[in-house]
Image (spheres, rainbow, N blue to C red):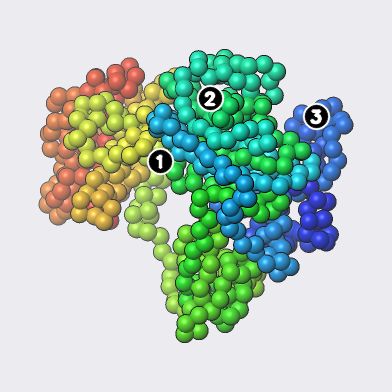
Amino acid sequence: MPTVSVKRDLLFQALGRTYTDEEFDELCFEFGLELDEITSEKEIISKEQGNVKAAGASDVVLYKIDVPANRYDLLCLEGLVRGLQVFKERIKAPVYKRVMPDGKIQKLIITEETAKIRPFAVAAVLRNIKFTKDRYDSFIELQEKLHQNICRKRALVAIGTHDLDTLSGPFTYTAKRPSDIKFKPLNKTKEYTACELMNIYKTDNHLKHYLHIIENKPLYPVIYDSNGVVLSMPPIINGDHSRITVNTRNIFIECTGTDFTKSLKLYLMGNDLLFKLFLFKELAYRKEMVRADLINKKVGIRETPENLAKLLTRMYLKSEVIGDGNQIEIEIPPTRADIIHACDIVEDAAIAYGYNNIQMTLPKTYTIANQFPLNKLTELLRYDMAAAGFTEVLTFALCSQEDIADKLGLDISATKAVHISNPKTAEFQVARTTLLPGLLKTIAANRKMPLPLKLFEISDIVIKDSNTDVGAKNYRHLCAVYYNKNPGFEIIHGLLDRIMQLLDVPPGEDKGGYVIKASEGPAFFPGRCAEIFARGQSVGKLGVLHPDVITKFELTMPCSSLEINIGPFL
């Protein structure tokens, strides 16, 4: 959840009145926000770096306010004030529209060279701006908040702001070899090539986090004006030539990115001073219909449609009652990107009504809560496995293809594994189809611990199943591993007998009993593997692991394992 720091006195000045800390905390709660901390710049530095570093820092009181992650329109002082003023019905929600300039329309030309790097770009012009020091700081801070939030640390979108009066359009967004790009970057005194800049910024505490986005690309994105002046090398740094200052009056804004939707719809929401004019391609208002009885039912209140429409209007959602008198038409502004479903509208109605004002009522249906049978059986088995001398571990539900296939002597196609479409790391490519790799990796990480190592885990595995709605099904497995100088097959076998005793499953094939039958498996030593049958079906395997498996998991001693599906024993 993003935290917005605002100066208390500036905030109260913009709101037109003062509040005590308790009153403002209550106002934030009513609006669905949270006043997280009351502090100052001096206090922050003192906590982080000590009193010596804090000497001379500002004592101005700061409010740190937690804002919902999807409310991009509240990420600065101006947006926060506008939202609160509309909520308190002191002002009406502004209407945004695209305005055609009196003079020449600026153009941003996108070349085909950018297609494989950052293919999307949009631009806007803000005219007749009047900055003060505080407004300028708010503008820059909003840009950084958007970078960290919706822009995903510039990986999806990077925003550049420039003094239009220092530039000459049309502008060109292209991509060139790093050695062919040369300009004076922000806050530098001379020109550097892109290659030199990447080396310089590797030690920059702020910019080094963004270098990986384009560092290994053959071409770097760059924006020029008609005179060949470099505006920026997104997503890394702007040029110093077009830097904005407190004296800037006209701003050229460019957004480049890899995500079309976010690039096109990143409206730079929230700054009432700066964003009276929106010059983006799309500023679409849309309308949604929600029935009043649905809102009343979901929230648990009894309000008239007219009152509900008034509540929604306070939340920046202009609403009116239409049709049969039970239908509410809601106008969604472009600044409310968080409204994507009727439930979001219902939530805003509940916030405006006040959660504390919703009366508590007893449910109309009488029910008795009970633990899910599979979870109850799991908990009981955990206690008894621990009593048997085994230590429980909890491993990741995702793993690499190698863990469940190659290392166990299987082909990945034979595992029926559910694959992750866009894995962020090789360690999380598939959902696990067995608990064994996780336990073996845990042993590998704890080889220096005293022997024997006796571990177990009871968790879900996931298998493809075309008969289910989602194409996959979870199974609750129990897996145990014994690691020592000798295989310890008899210990694992004894553990199986104890588990079956606890499950009230007698030995033998008669009367729903259990038996083990000789079997083979690529993960097990030949002649040292058995399949477990219980109540007429196969429920798992136990045996001594193959030396190849042990070696692939970086282990050096024999190991026996047991893995069963506990679902059939419910």
State the SS at label 2: helix
Residues 256 and 153: in front is 256
Distance between the Cα atoms at labels 2 and 1? 52 Å
Q: Single out the residue that lies furthest toward the front.
A: 103
Position in image of residue 130 (x %, y %): 76, 46
Nearer to us of marks 3 and 1 is 3
Position in image of residue 565 (x %, y %): 26, 45
**Residue linked to disc 3:** 50
Q: Give the amino acid at mark 3.
A: Gly
First in residue order: circle 3 vs circle 1: 3
Position in image of residue 216 (x %, y %): 45, 21
Mark 1 neighbour density, 10 Å: few (under 14) some (14–19) many (20 or more) = few
Q: Single out the residue that lies furthest toward the right.
A: 56
Q: Give the amino acid at mark 1.
A: Ala
Q: Residue at x 40, y 31 (%)?
A: 112
Mark 3 neighbour density, 10 Å: few (under 14) some (14–19) many (20 or more) = few
Q: Residue at x 16, y 30 (%)?
A: 521
Position in image of residue 265 (x %, y %): 51, 49
Q: Residue at x 50, y 58 (%)?
A: 284
The relative height of residue 83 versus residue 546 in the rendered view (above or below) is below
| Position of residue 341 in the picture relative to residue 468 (left or right) | right
Q: Which mark is residue 387?
A: 1
Judge whether residue 234 can be spotted in this image.
no
Distance between the Cα atoms at labels 2 and 3? 31 Å
In the rendered image, which quarter is residue 562 located in?
top left
Q: Which mark is residue 97?
A: none
Residues 44 and 128: in front is 128
Nearer to us of marks 2 and 1 is 2
The relative height of residue 513 versus residue 330 in the rendered view (above or below) is above
Distance between the Cα atoms at labels 3 and 1? 50 Å
**Residue linked to disc 2:** 211
